[in-house]
Image (spheres, helix red, strand yellow):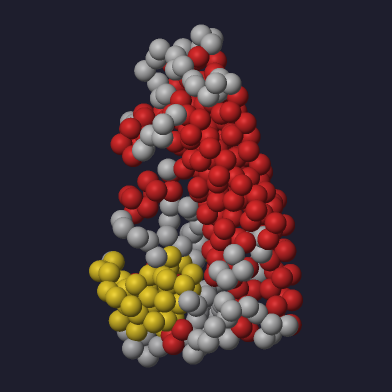
Amino acid sequence: METAWSWLVEETNRNRRVPPSPKRYLELVTGCMEKIAQKMTSLQCNQELCQYLYDLLQRCFRDSYQMLHPSGFYTAPKSRTVDFPQMLWLLLRLAEEVEGFVTHSSDSDVWIQHAIFFPKVSEEVSLVASELALYMKIATYFISLHEGQRDTSILQIMIEHELSSERGVQIAEDVRPRASRDRERLLAKLNVLLRSEGKWGRQMTAFPYRSERQLVTFLLGRLAPAPTISILGSELPVVWSSSSFWEVNYGSLKQLERLGTGGAGIVHKAEWLETLVAEKTFFGSDNPSFKNEVSILAGLSHPNIVPMFCYAMNDRCCSIVMQLMDGDLFHLMQSRLR
């Protein structure tokens, strides 16, 4: 089975565009970090999670900078492992990932749309944090390798260890309380906005089926603790009650183009709450495939599972609204791992 280390070697060799020197890589990472630092002062949501990722990124940067000779050159050890520029290519990709997350959490025009993804934030932050933690371990042992204190087999073992369940549990324990506090802040902010209707920025442009109150109420309903039911030993959210916040008005969906078919439904690229989404439509107002899929998706949360935002129903058909995935699932997963 292909290891994470061999995957890194293959991907960096295939995709990187090598700058003149490792020092140049660090300059590019520095540029990302300066942008992040500027945006951290105007966060609209995810405050603690953004700070958590930024702190990890800073530690990775410090570890990498210590590996550079004052002259700006680095002499790689004689080994078959990934070289220093490849490592810095990975650090740059991770810095861009963190910058994108902070941007969505700070942009006054799009943060409310980004908040729709909040139920998935913990898993996505944990994934990026795992990659940053792995990078720090690689950097530590890369220095030891360069100094002749370790061989490649030990390095390989340590990298595989970083992907063990113990590391995942530790990161989850770090992320969970931060996400919980961010959620409470977001709920409080949405409640304030609900009471001050009409004082939003230009992100609340005219939309036939969306008012400020509808949007905030929807998010409040999704973020508030939901009742669950037990099905085959698993706890799933109740999605079919009359007060379910999973259901939205069909008029809020605007189909843009057909993408293909998926299972028993037809998939369209659509617009919902000024956000591009995938709409999977089933024919009939009481389609069993639709109800089964909604019940399952409502209880799933994983960074490599396309999330369901909501569903819509009328007398002729019913639709599931999901995150728009550019390309196929394999390439989406690869892009999230880079």
| Residue 146 as seen in the image, left or right of residue 82 | right
Above or below for 313 versus 327: below
Q: Is residue 57 visible?
A: yes
Residue 160 percent location from the top left of the image? 47, 28
Q: Nearer the viewer, residue 82 or 209?
A: 82
Quadrant placement of the N terminus: top left
Name the residue: 53% across, 35% down.
26
For residue 112, which quarter of the picture? bottom right
Residue 62 percent location from the top left of the image? 62, 31
Name the residue: 49% across, 90% down.
208
Q: Nearer the viewer, residue 18 or 295?
A: 18
Q: Residue furthest front?
A: 71
Quadrant placement of the C terminus: top left
Above or below for 304 versus 296: above
Name the residue: 56% across, 61% down.
104
Name the residue: 25% across, 69% down.
260
